[in-house]
Amino acid sequence: MTKRQTDDAYIRANLLAWDEVAPIHAQHRQTSLLERFRQPGFSVLDDIATTQLKRLGVAGKNVAQVCCNNGIELLSCKTLGAARCVGFDGAQGFVDQGIALAKAAGQDVEFVCCDAHAIPSDYHAGFDIVMITIGVLSWMPDIDRFFSQIAKLLAPDGGDLYLRTSLYLADV
Ligand SMILES: C[S@@+](CC[C@H](N)C(=O)[O-])C[C@H]1O[C@@H](n2cnc3c(N)ncnc32)[C@H](O)[C@@H]1O
């Protein structure tokens, strides 16, 4: 097996595992998240993330989140006034949770189920900000390959990568 084949097998197995745990995560928090996102203006972002995203001019910008899980950070960007928001995650179970939360919040946020290494080309060059947060990089078997995919999402005339790898979710 080549390294690429081994990496691809690992990615597939990892995504199957995430899909398996998605209903367990939902059992613990989906009901309370639905309740919270029904409240206008609800955000899970702490003051630091909120300030940093505002400094990037998130209001009015197109934002993608890769490996977004149930999308609560992306929904919070929408609350901050982001324009087009698209969340990508490889586990359908989490994508479904994100869709339900967006509906509860009354927000137009799109969720796409796909491997981060194979984001459909329709989404390339479409975003001013790409967000990656805690608990993502450690799952990537080849970090150069991962970021070469992320780069494709950013607008060709420049965009920002918002990378936050420390724990910061407020109020969940
Ligand atoms: C620990 S969660 C972190 C997400 C987010 N930072 C949060 O706190 O909700 C990691 C997410 O990455 C997703 N993921 C892992 N590997 C992926 C891949 N290759 N492509 C797409 N999604 C992936 C998993 O399905 C999971 O939802």
Image (tube, rainbow, N blue to C red):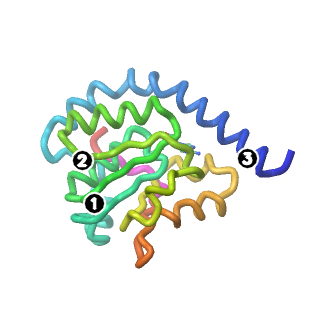
Give the magenta part as a residue range: 164-169
Spatial separation of the CA atoms under disc 3 and disc 1:
35 Å
Mark closest to the chain's N terminus, 3 or 1: 3
Pick out the residue farthest to the right: 1
Query: In the picture, which quadrant includes the C terminus?
Result: top left
- Is disc 1 in contact with disc 2, using a CB cutoff of under 8 Å? yes
- Residue at the image position 81 percent from the left and 51 percent from the top: 3
Asked whether 29 falls inside the magenta stretch, the response is: no
In the image, farthest residue toward the front: 122
| Mark 2 surroundings: few (<14), some (14-19) or many (≥20) residues within 10 A | many
Residue 23 picture location, percent across and down? 45, 23
User: Which corner quadrant of the image does residue 99 belong to?
Assistant: top left
Q: Is mark 1 within 8 Å of ligand 1?
A: no
Q: Is 27 above or below relative to 103?
A: above
Residue tagged 2 = 43
Rendering coords of residue 51 (x, y %): 27, 65
Q: Residue at x 67, y 34 (%)?
A: 13
- Side (left or right) of 116 relative to 160: right
Which residue has dot 3 on it?
Answer: 7
What x and y, as percent, mark residue 148?
60, 64
Tell me: 100 left or right of 90. Answer: left
Closer mark to the observer between disc 3 and disc 2: 3
